[in-house]
Image (cartoon, rainbow, N blue to C red):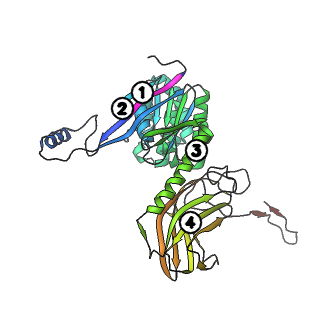
Amino acid sequence: MSMPASIAVRAEGLGKRYQLGRQQAGYSLLSEAIADRVRRRGKGLPKREEFWALRDIDFQVEHGERFGIIGHNGAGKSTLLKLLARVTPPTAGTIRLRGQVGALLEVGTGFHAELTGRENIFLNGAILGMSRREIAAKFDEIVSFAEVERFVDTPVKRYSSGMYLRLAFAVAAHLEPDVLIVDEVLSVGDLAFQEKCIGRMETVANEGRTVLFVSHNLAAVQKLCPRSIMLSHGRLVMEDSTDAVVREYVRSVRKDTATELSSRTDRTGSGRLRFTEVRFELPDSREQAPRTGENLDVVLSYEGDPGKRLRHAHFGVTVFTGLGAQILQCQSNVAGTRFDELPLTGEVRLRLPRLPLPAGRYTINIYAEAAGETADWVQRAAELIVTEGDFYGSGQNHAEVHETVLVDQSWSLTEGTAAGEPERVAQT
């Protein structure tokens, strides 16, 4: 069946199956082929376990549409993009794409480390089917966007990850592919570069080309993509407006976290108290995720051990970046709050006024002490997704830097004065 001219991407019954521990379809070394033949001739070897990374995926994207793909880690997002970019073949189903595809799936995809930035630009253009003249016409624009003018004739193996990313995105977005596929790699860059990339993807779509965008930055997906799909465990569970898909994703994350916490066994403590749920409450219940600078309540539900009174308890919440660095620690006793006696079951609420965390993904550890001993301590008890907000009320978003928190601040300027002259002060 032919695909309507208005459709740029169509997936029908798409699936990808892997056999764990086995070399997948594609090029392999002679030694790998020999080893695999020996294994298959062996006696009594266990049956290979099959794993479906994707199954029964159906969707289509129109020309010029900006389309988001959302899901938790391991949901199948990157596998889907690799199928669309023809990096790996599907096990089942079909993919139809109209026109040339430019893909940025990971930092430096399609680059040759020994070649210079200049040479890689021409190499990638040739792979996309562009003539040398067409690439040369875009060359200065690509280099300027990537901000690598001084290093364009340096082998890219000497580039930092940020330089690598900027050039890779610039090439993928400026060599005029009909379909541009961008994976989570934008998270490597700072906020200014992310905004620049999103602006470029908007331009690409306005020129009539198609953008498929995967990111855990929900605010970025909402800003760029009017429509999205949500994947979970390799299956498509929702296709709707991006706002509706984001609401469902956040709801599912909260539900999964609550279910997992009540049954988690990888916890330490005496057991006199056990956390059963962590949830985040916002001033406006219609909001899907906390924003930088807005109030946030972290609510810890617990159950005590019947027959044992909980006295002299205190609680703690520790926030870590995606890289595992501790960024924020809150302790009830340090804040001056005393819980001399706790009911058998209840909720402890931590209020974080004007949330000081930049936009990003964080994990939370929680613990409770009672009568001088650890009652319960759960690491990675919940995931906190923070979206961009105007912390300072200045109209400026803070750069996404996970090594810091935001604090109230004021700046002033004092003009130098000559002896005997009055001092003049300018404040902001």
What residue sits right under mark 4 in the picture? Answer: 301
Query: From the viewer's perspective, is the residue at label 4 or at label 1 nearer?
Result: 4
Q: Earlier in the sequence, mark 2 or mark 3?
A: 2
For residue 348, above or below residue 134: below
Check contact, mark 2 vs mark 1: CB within 8 A: yes
Residue at mark 2 to residue at mark 3: CA–CA distance? 27 Å
Check contact, mark 2 vs mark 4: CB within 8 A: no
The answer to whether residue 404 of the structure is visible from this angle is: yes
Q: Secondary structure at mark 4?
A: strand
Nearest the viewer among 163 and 320 is: 320
- Residue 317 percent across, percent down from the top left: 55, 68
Residue at mark 2 to residue at mark 1: CA–CA distance? 8 Å
- Residue 300 percent across, percent down from the top left: 57, 66
Q: Earlier in the sequence, mark 3 or mark 4?
A: 3
Q: Secondary structure at mark 2?
A: loop
Task: Identify the residue at image location x=20%, y=41%.
Answer: 32
Q: Quadrant of residue 425?
A: bottom right
**Label placed on residue 90:** 2
**Label placed on residue 95:** 1
Q: Quadrant of residue 76?
A: top left
Query: From the viewer's perspective, is the residue at label 2 or at label 4 nearer?
Result: 4
Q: Earlier in the sequence, mark 2 or mark 1?
A: 2
